[in-house]
Amino acid sequence: MNPLIIRSPEVFREKQNIDARVHHRVTAIDLQKRAVRVVNLGTGKTLEERFDHLLIATGASIILPKIPGLNARGVYTLSTLQSGIALREAMDQAGPQRIVLVGAGYIGLEMAENFIQRGFQVSIVEQAPQVMRTIDEDLAALLAAELKKNGVQLFLEESLQGFELEGGGVRAVVTDRRTLPADLVILGLGVRPNSELAGEAGIPLGKTGGIKVNERMETEIEGVWAAGNCAEALHLVSRRPVVFALGTVANKQGRVAGINIAGGQATFPGVVGTAMVKVFDWEVARTGLQEREAKQAGIIAASVKIEGRTRAGYYPGAGKIFVKITFEPGNGRLLGGQIVGQEGAGKRIDVLATALHAGMTVEEMINLDLGYSPPFSPAWDPILIACRQAAGQL
């Protein structure tokens, strides 16, 4: 079994007594009959399954532009284990040399590093003026420089217009500014909640497009639950509903829904939007709200940024780290943080995420008893230095 698959259908049946039916698709939910319509993809047979409780965990769908050529040979998206296997097989068999990544989010940046390591020519096309829009422009510039240093061509503020095809296969990517030769194209334009099935059944959706749920993961229909990338969550800082397509959030929501369906009591309080990625020698992480996000939520916000070292300056291997935190200038409440740095930088985001869950102020954080040893941190951790800078502005 593939190591990325935690449990096979056989394990579900034999050890958990769960009838896990793969290669079946639910095509409709009938709330009046309390049943779902299911198609067996192997036989084409349609059947109906009654339910007392229904958990919708349909995940997210890839966002695709409305342009011709999306089904051409050599054009890929990455959303499932199988899509990754198909891409790997195409690379091994066809031996592409020129790869174009459309989108400079998490998937695009991770794929760029892996393709460069395999010796391919890599270009990234991004409609925004920066890579990784979930961090601020000044920090994103550090990543852009790292990508270019490692041989990645960046084309920012360019939008995908179409493809040039030959014999059913992709030969070039056409933007609003240029034509880029391509043997392989990967589209990483983000995802949206896969909530159409629920919406068609009359299950209320939220403004985000995700399925509306309460803290028990219940929808507004009794006995119908939702969890994962198709469901909303409460952002604990902005107090607004959000959808974060992250496995960490999906696992926690699924656990809460399962406990409640089984008759227990559990709640999922919400999220702060913590995420991280590695881009060559840089680690990138964020949590909470950027300053612009805070202002969009009607929160008065300010930010400070500091540059420090990941270890004691005299210790071998000490690398750069940039920490940026956002806070309320009136009361000092922490609103969010971003980190870009070398080895040992990224996981420091967990300190900020924990502080957000606790509703701490930057002044309260200054005296956190964080671990210190020269191989791991300066005497004043960069997180605490940033908090001191913020507290000085109160």
Image (cartoon, rainbow, N blue to C red):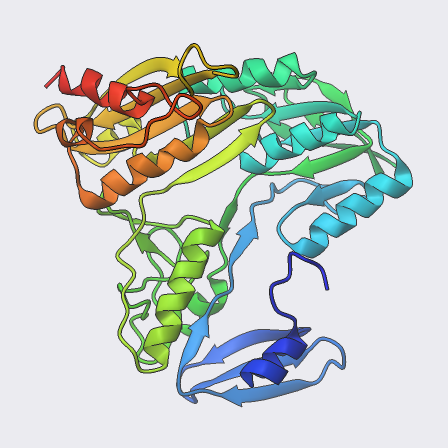
Residue at the (75%, 41%) spot, across then down: 75
Q: Is residue 51 above or below residue 73?
A: below
Res. 375 image quadrant: top left
- Whether residue 161 can be seen here: no
Which is nearer the eye, 60 or 363?
363
Q: Is residue 132 left or right of residue 280?
A: left
Q: Is residue 120 above or below residue 186?
A: above
Which is nearer the eye, 195 or 363?
363
Q: Is residue 147 left or right of residue 2?
A: left
Which is nearer the eye, 72 or 276?
276
Res. 394 image quadrant: top left
Residue at the (83%, 44%) spot, across then down: 90
Q: Is residue 202 left or right of residue 159?
A: left
- Whether residue 231 can be seen here: yes
Return the x and y of residue 142 as percentages of the image width and height.
Answer: 49, 15
Q: Is residue 176 left or right of residue 139?
A: right
Return the x and y of residue 91 as percentages of the image width and height.
Answer: 83, 39
Residue at the (45%, 87%) spot, across then down: 51
Count of numbered circles on the image? 0
Return the x and y of residue 64 as percentages of the image width and height.
Answer: 60, 44
Return the x and y of residue 42 as percentages of the image width and height.
Answer: 76, 77
Q: Is residue 106 above or below residue 40?
A: above
Residue at the (48%, 66%) spot, across then down: 57
Q: Residue furthest top?
A: 314
Q: Is residue 250 above or below residue 89?
A: below
The quadrant in which the N terminus is found is bottom right
